Image: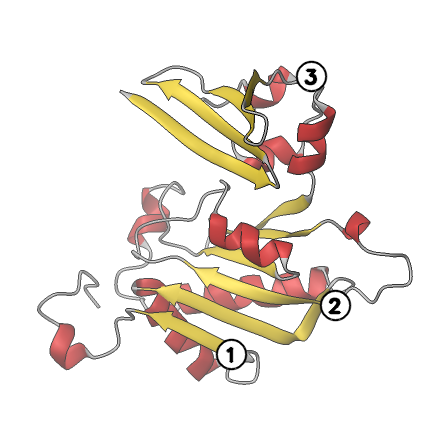
Amino acid sequence: GYACRVLACQDNLMLWTFSKRNTMERLFLSDTSLGILEKVTLASPESIMKSKSISTITLQAAHFENAEFSKAIHHINSEVITLEKDQICYQGILSYKGTENYHEDDDIELPLVAMPHGGPHSNIVANYDSVISFLNSVGFAVLCLNYRGSLAYGTKSEASLPGYIGQNDVFDCYNLINFTLNKYNNILDATNVFVVGGSHGGFLTAHLISQYPNLFKAACARNPVLNIATEVASTDIPD
């Protein structure tokens, strides 16, 4: 009945939430070096009143009274990119180190790591993730891909994927990557694009590098669904 989530970390600061079933999450900031725990109050509480969940994207748009926390959470920029096909929305979540961390004369050409989720009926949400946070901190932009068929976009979206796996999902991932590279061409390096995914995300990784070989510099497919002959009895992908 209780849940804790870590939303963001920087140096000795950790932002986390605590909630009981069907109640609003409470937000806390911990200083691990000093052993200090502080409840965080939002200067703009209306920014989270529409949802019982506090997401990193919501936090990025908020103003905080706690200066140290404000600095920590705004260290990373986050953007939600929404596209539409056949009257179905699909989204990408882009995160990268804030441009204020660079000098004026720096060439900001961040390599981009694209991450399609597994499932396929799953999703990637705008919460803290240690892998994404690490990649952002060392200078990579990360684009998480929620293609048509991802959860939380309605039954029409979910029903649109079976029968078109390897087509619709691959097209959506490519379209999100291409759109993002064009929109953020002032900070992203289109010659340094990578893709990584596991399970169905690994299946999509293999399709992306085979269908669009000139787009990607390297790829990592974790436990991908690739061999139909050996996996037909165990895979949950009907196609």
Contact, mark 3 vs mark 2 (Cβ under 8 Å): no
- Left or right: 147 as drawn, with respect to 70: left
Q: Secondary structure at mark 3?
A: loop
How far apart are the two marked residues, 2 and 1, measured between alpha carbons?
17 Å
Outermost residue, front side: 34
Q: Which residue is mark 1?
A: 218
Give the answer, above or below, for where 151 lies relative to 54.
below
Q: Nearer the viewer, residue 214 or 12?
A: 12
Q: Secondary structure at mark 2?
A: loop
Position of residue 47 measured from the top left corner of the image (x, y, whole percent): 61, 22
- The answer to whether one can see residue 166 in this image is no
Query: Hey, what amino acid is under mark 3?
Result: Ala
Query: Hey, what amino acid is under mark 2?
Result: Glu
Q: Earlier in the sequence, mark 3 or mark 2?
A: 3
Give the answer, above or below, for where 5 lies relative to 165.
above
Position of residue 211 measured from the top left corner of the image (x, y, whole percent): 45, 81
Q: Residue 117's quadrant in the figure?
A: bottom left
Q: Which residue is mark 2?
A: 109
Q: Residue at x 67, y 32 (%)?
A: 61
Q: Which residue is mark 3?
A: 43
Q: Where's the C terminus, which quadrant?
A: bottom left
Residue 122: image tag = none
